[in-house]
Each structure stands twice: as C-alpha cells, then as structure tokens.
Amino acid sequence: MSVATLPPRALVPVATLPLRVLVIEKQMLFAKAVAQVLSTDPDIKVVGIASGRDAAVPKDVDIVVIDIDTEEIDDVVEHFKTRAPAARICALSAHTQGELMQHCLSAGADAYIVKDSSLQELVTAIKTLGEGASYVDPRVAASLLRRRGPSNRSTNELSPREREIIRLIAQGLSNRDIGRRLVLSEKTIKNHVSHIFSKIHCTARSQAAVHAIRIGLA
C-alpha cells in the first residue's frame, strides 16, 4: 500500500478545557470502560458513547475516538469529519499492522491507538490531539520503520541527516538516544530536531513521527 505525500497539519490547539470526547465503539462494555477512565481526568469530558456512525454528534465535540475495525476506514473517517469538521479523529484498532495505521492517517485520522495499549496512553493521545498535534502508537511506528529500513524517497525540505533523525524520532528515541546511535552530541541532535520542526512546521515529536510516516520516510 502506498501512502500519499501529505503536508504536515497546522498546530491548532483546542481553545478550552475540558476536551469534549465522543466514543464510537461496537463493544459497549469496552466503550463504557474507556469512557469511565477518560472521565476521571479533569481535562476530558465524555459527551457521548455510541456503537456506530449513526451516533448523535455534538457540534462542539473536540475529539472523536472511533473503533475502525468494523467499519470501512475511509468512509467512517469522512463521515465524522463531515459531521464534526472541527473535531480531531482518534482511530482505535486491535491491529498492529503499520500499513493499517498509514491507511488511517491518509484517510484523515489524526491519531492511531492499538486497543491493548494502556488507558493512560489513550489519555495521552487525546491530550496530544487537544494540543493540535498528531499521535501514533509508538510500537506500531517503530515496527514499521524497522521493517522497511532506509527510505529511498526523497524530500525537498530535509537533509539526509535530518531524514535519518526524524526516522529515529518516529521510533520513539530521545535526543540522547539518537545522539548515542549516531555518535553525535545531544546538543547537536537538539539543534537538528529544532531545524526539522521548523522545516515541517510542527512543534511536537509525535507530529514529526506522523509526518515521517505520511511522506514515506517510514
């Protein structure tokens, strides 16, 4: 499966807290458990739980968490993007295939989380979306990058060294770990990361990882 080259998305933080979240999940017991955990965080308010695309969508919803395993990905993402244009989409799946994650991102999802992740990771993903950034499950991203190896796809904005570093960012490595891997100082890596963020117009490592996957560096 090839992934279209997409520009990085603008960082547009949600203006007010708590973040209003709608949970779309076929298994209602799981949906209620997710909603219960999310509701314990003061920065998150669950505004609805439903089992499918016929859910009532509050016009001011900030984030829609969607189980994409029982839906046609492109259709369900487009459906909720149309009904709630300002909302960000968090795809929830039982599958760890990197290609499926890529498909979701290309279809317009802003995050991809595997169902066996901790609920705290889901909270982190939702808050990341609320800040205007994107989020991908680090295990799936790292697996995808390791399996594919170095990319031959060229990009105009990043140097070879920067492409190497953004791949390692997508694998979840810290600046210190990247420095050790490339035998460079942590300060040098920090400078490279700043340049990368400036070139691709992002402010978060998770968004840089998504950008790497979208443009084929993954």
Image: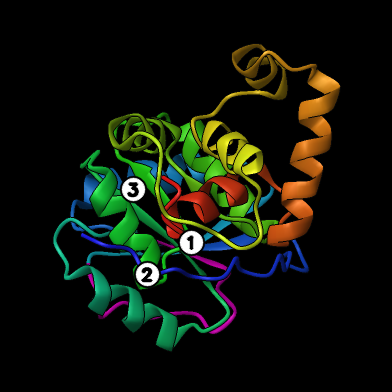
Q: Which mark is residue 4?
A: 2
Mark 1 nearby-residue class (10 Å; few <14, some 14–19, many ≥20): many
The answer for how far apart the CA atoms under marks 2 and 1 are is: 15 Å
Secondary structure at badge 3 equals helix
x and y percentages locating residue 186 in the rendered image:
79, 19
x and y percentages locating residue 205 in the rendered image:
65, 42
The reply to whether the C-beta atoms of the residues labelled 2 and 3 are less than 8 Å apart is no
Which secondary structure dominates the residues rendered in magenta? loop
Q: Quadrant of residue 194?
A: top right
x and y percentages locating residue 123 in the rendered image:
54, 41
Say what amino acid the circle numbered 3 marks. Answer: Lys
Q: Earlier in the sequence, mark 3 or mark 1?
A: 3
Say what amino acid the circle numbered 2 marks. Answer: Ala
Instruction: Tell me what residue is drawn at x 44 percent, y 43 percent.
Output: 36
Instruction: Tell me what residue is drawn at x 69 percent, y 47 percent.
Output: 204
Q: Earlier in the sequence, mark 2 or mark 3?
A: 2
Residue carrying label 1 = 110
Secondary structure at badge 1 equals loop
Front-most of 103 and 88? 103
Residue carrying label 3 = 32
Say what amino acid the circle numbered 1 marks. Answer: Asp
Instruction: Tell me what residue is drawn at x 40 percent, y 37 percent.
Output: 150
Which residue in the rendered view is the most extreme toward the left? 70
Tell which tag, 3 or 1, sits nearer the viewer: 1
Q: Quadrant of residue 153?
A: bottom left
Secondary structure at badge 2 equals loop
Tell which tag, 2 or 3, sits nearer the viewer: 2
Q: Which residues are magenta?
A: 52-65
Tell which tag, 2 or 1, sits nearer the viewer: 2
